[in-house]
Structure formats: structure tokens, C-alpha cells
Amino acid sequence: MKTAVMPLAFDFEGQAVRTINRNGVVWWVLSDVCAVLDIRKHRDAASRLDNDERGSVLVDTLGGPQEVTAINESGIYSLVLTSRKAAAKRFKKWVTQEVLPALRRTGTYSIGIQPDISHVLGVAEAAILTSQNAVRVLTPKAQAYHSLTCMDGLHTLTDAAKLCGQTRNQFLSKLEVLSWIYRPGGKGCWSAKADKIKAGYLTHKYCDIRDADGQLKTRSQVVVTDRGVAKLKIILARLENTMLAGDAA
């Protein structure tokens, strides 16, 4: 029986491209790649690839586990050669010069401007050396908070609220009204709307933490990208102006 995996969604020029790690090899969701390359029939595209360039994977989605076709790096290059879209060359460069090197170095990729990785690694190494004793005594809750907030280009809902000049409660209420976030079943933790993930405004951050009993658990939290913060500042400013105009009238 296949086990559903959680894909990592990256942003390429405003379009979401999901990837899956299979035994240390990056596989790409075919339908997302075809959308970027303007290839309309992704099933036909899959049939033109060699057997070792394509495969099916079971991924977690907001609607539950879903089986999708994925392609490896060789498959990516095969499709790029068949695409007539001007973005194909930029997509190939993005894959080879940004995403894959970042994944191989750090196992992650953040949406937005990439920092000087050598500087980041130097700062991280120094921080680790100076804080090892403190980390050992962190509670599981504090460890989870640390993991969820140390993100380049991503912001927790609380931090995003501050950046937008809102209190956390105001911010969450407005995001719910604007259909950016929701609570599955009307309760529990917040989840990001699928269209906002696809647009590159929101994503989920996952981390493994140990509870007070030492059990390993995976925690998910909605986070806002730099692109999402910029978009929300515009939307919230418009809402405020509309409200002020209504009060004046």
C-alpha cells in the first residue's frame, strides 16, 4: 500500500510547482510542470517520456490523498525541449540554478529572494555553537515555535499580522472573511486555501517535535510568503479606505 506524502510547493513566476522527495531524489508533479510550460495535455506529455522518467505518487492534498503523475529531473529536461513557451528556458534555469542546488544543500526552498547562502550558513553555524546549551533545555512547545519561526521569506500568522499593522485576532478574522484561511470542520488549526497556496501567497510549514511524553509528532502551521504579505497590505489598505469612505458618507 502506498503511503501519501506531503509535497513541497515552490513558486515559479506566480505558479505553484509541487515536488516530492523519493529516496533522496526530487520528483515534480507533472500537471504543475505542464501548466508552467503551457503543455495542455499532461497525460500525452507523460506518454512521450521514458519509463524511468515518470511514475505515480500518492500525495496529501486538502481534499485527501490523491494519486498524481510525477517526473524526475531527466523528465523535466525532456519536456522543456518540447515546450514552445518563452518561459521554458527561464524555468529550466530556475530548476537547475536555484531549486535543485538549494534542495541539495538544505533540503528546503523558500519563496522569494534567496539570500547569500554562504553568509546564511556562517551565521547559522555561529548561532548553533552559541546556543547549544539553551536548545537542550527548551520545552517541546518552545522547540516547535523555534522551528516554525526561523524561516527565510516565510512569516507566521502573528508576524504577518504585525507587518500588516494588525492585531493577530483582527488579522485572522479578515483572512477568514477573505477566504485565505479556514478551519477544517469549523474547528482546530487553521489551514490555507488551495488557491492561495497555488498563487504563492500562503504555504504550510511542517516540523517534527516531541511532546512531553517523548512521542514524535508532526505539526503543521499556515505561514505567509513575502509575496502574500505584499498582497495583503494592498488588500487591507483598500478595505480600510472603503470603510473610511463609508463612515464619511
Image: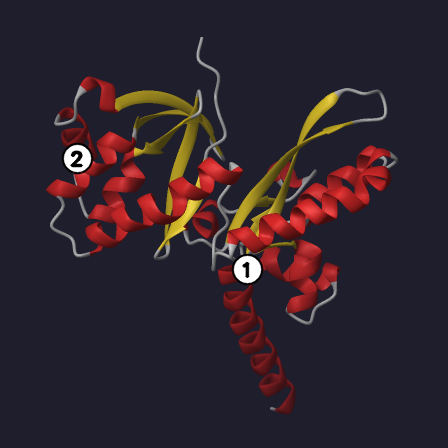
**Which image quarter: residue 80?**
top left
Residue 220 in view (yes/no): yes
* Local SS, label 1: loop
Residue 152 in view (yes/no): no
Q: Which mark is residue 78?
A: 2
Q: Residue at x 44, y 20 (%)?
A: 23
In the rendered structure, the answer to whether residue 187 lies left or right of residue 112 reads right
Q: Residue furthest right?
A: 137
Q: Which mark is residue 178?
A: 1
Q: Residue at x 34, y 48 (%)?
A: 97
Mark 2: which amino acid? Ser
Question: Mark 1 and mark 2 in contact (Cβ < 8 Å)?
Answer: no
Image coords of residue 125 (percent x, y):
67, 45
Which label's residue is closer to the chain start, 2 or 1?
A: 2
In the rendered structure, the answer to whether residue 101 lies left or right of residue 147 reads left
Q: Residue at x 68, y 72 (%)?
A: 165
Comparing 78 with 224, the one in front is 78
Comparing 47 with 114, the one in front is 114
Image coords of residue 196 (percent x, y):
47, 52
